[in-house]
Image: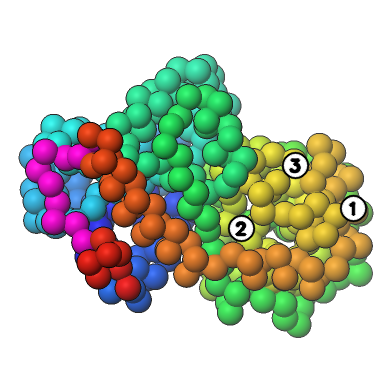
Amino acid sequence: MRVLIATDAWPPQVNGVVSTLTRLEAELKRRGVEAVFITPHDFRGIPLPGYRELRVAVPGAGAVARLIDEAAPDYIHIATEGPIGWSVRWRCLNEGRAFTSSYHTKFPEYANRIFGVPESWIYALERRFHARSAGVMVATPSLESELRQRGFARLLRWTRGVDTERFKPAARSFRRSEPLFLYVGRVSREKNIEAFLDAPMPGWKLVVGDGPQLPALKRRYPDVVFAGRREGAELAAIYASADVFVFPSRTDTFGLVLLEALASGLPVAAYPVTGPIDVVESGVSGILDDDLSTAAVRALSLDREAARSRAEKFTWARSAEQFLDNVVSANAAAAKHGRAPRHAFKARTVADGGLR
């Protein structure tokens, strides 16, 4: 079985979408399923305004058609609503091919926060994008409920996972007498990092990550330690050495770093919003509060083993199984209700041995 996945986010970008898709590729391979990707590397690109280190693909219709034809996929999944996503969507509709999609990022809230664009405009555009999808995959129950209220249909659950072998409780590689409050993630406006940096906390703060806001925040907050980007064993050691993980974002749809922190035995302090309310058990593995200072201080007293136990409920294997089940069931439903592609794939289902 071969699944074509179209995405505007791909390495060297570092974000939750990239992490999810790269882990999905590995898990699908273990199941004998081939994942073929259409990514920004397949096209020329231009710098993204405000994020010049990122490049936006400029896909040509002919190139997109050729890539799809060469892949000869059983199923098509569109992971992002960027230029590649729109181009593949157009090609699928033009040729009568069914496709599934996923909703990873709250672009309406990001566009409003960064550029002042009304959220309703972007939501209208995204509803149009996903309206023709055979199934729209979302990571959490709260996001599903929110999108349903905004008029999105055919929503399917697709959870996330964490590598509990890499991220785990360990001897602390560095230690101070005061508590260490940690943030890991992109250093950019949409992450609301200033809420963490401005909140009074009884200890010191460490920010791990890179992004366009990093130089300005370094100047504004000289008492905060900015470590830049860290990966692998070094990042895992930082998680294990902290006392509380602080997640100030109000717009993330999940937050893979939440699972990495919990797997490291690190309680979480966050706002009670989509993402944290689905991942963190407030009062057990973290504290969710509209006052970030209160959440961080209360999280200091939580059991680190409870944090680890919560993370162990999320696996990449389960995530991949959900993805495959969604792809097959959504395409079957599309065929049943008259949304079948005109040029039907020879798609193999569970019944005839396509999934193992």
Q: Is residue 58 left or right of residue 282?
A: left
Point 9% across, 43% down: residue: 343
> Does the stretch in magenta take in 344?
yes
Q: Looking at numbered disc 3 in the image, what kind of residue is underneath it?
A: Tyr
Q: Which residue is mark 3?
A: 271
Local packing at callout 2 (Cα closer than 10 Å; few below 14, some 14-19, many 20+) is some
Q: Counting residues from the N terminus, which is met first, the one under dot 2 or under dot 1? A: 2
Res. 287 in view:
yes
Query: Of the numbered discs in the image, which one, if any, rests on residue 257?
Result: 2
Report helix, strand or loop for mark 2.
Answer: helix
Question: Which of label 3 and label 1 is nearer to you?
Answer: 3
Q: Looking at numbered disc 1 in the image, what kind of residue is underneath it?
A: Val
Q: Is residue 265 left or right of residue 260?
A: right
Query: Of the numbered discs in the image, which one, if any, rests on residue 297?
Result: 1
Q: Counting residues from the N terminus, which is met first, the one under dot 2 or under dot 3? A: 2
Q: Looking at numbered disc 2 in the image, what kind of residue is underneath it?
A: Val
Point 13% across, 32% down: residue: 94
Report helix, strand or loop for mark 1.
Answer: helix
For the record, the magenta segment spans: 339-348
Question: Alpha-carbon distance for marks 2 and 3?
Answer: 15 Å
Residue 297, position in %: x, y?
A: 90, 53
